[in-house]
Amino acid sequence: MAGVMREFEDLRVKVDDVIYMPSLDAPHEKPHPFVYFISIHNHSAVPITIRGRKWVVQEETGETTVVEGDGIVGQTPRIEPGGHFSYNSYHVVSQAAVVTGAFFGETADGEWVYTRIPEFHLSVPTWA
């Protein structure tokens, strides 16, 4: 990602849902899987291609996990003006956690932009 990157107010992220899913595979040390549903909305007049993402997961234990990578779930979606891209994925944690992050995109004319992922919580149910 070359050049200066700026926050792009017209690209907005919505956390549509977060669901505790104990039936999913999870390692012994992180036994609590959560599925999250995300939508990225382009309210600008230009197409945006999502090139990468960064997630920061801060557990109650104090452990912080940073996940960075290209694209989203193996894709680099192009979001047209007025359009959106929705997907779901999951995280596994050992304790309750707070999640934040950002998506990184590129406009049609090559400008690099980012938008923040609103903070959301992975709350382990008391029965778990």
Image: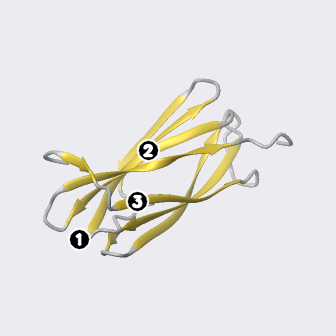
Q: Do the residues bearing badges 3 and 2 touch, measured as CB atoms within 8 Å?
A: no
In the displayed structure image, the side of residue 63 where residue 123 appears, left or right = right
The residue indicated by pointer 1 is 46
The residue indicated by pointer 2 is 101
The x, y position of residue 34, in whole percent, is 65, 50
Residue 31 badge:
none
Residue 12 badge:
3
The x, y position of residue 44, in whole percent, is 28, 68
Amino acid identity at mark 3: Arg
- What is the secondary structure assignment of the residue under circle 2? strand
- What is the secondary structure assignment of the residue under circle 1? loop
Q: CA distance from mark 1 to mark 2?
A: 23 Å
In the displayed structure image, the side of residue 49 where residue 125 appears, left or right = right
Amino acid identity at mark 2: Gly
Q: Nearer the viewer, residue 59 or 15?
A: 15
Residue 60, above or below 106: above
Residue 103, above or below 28: below
Q: CA distance from mark 3 to mark 2?
A: 13 Å
- Picture quadrant of residue 12: bottom left
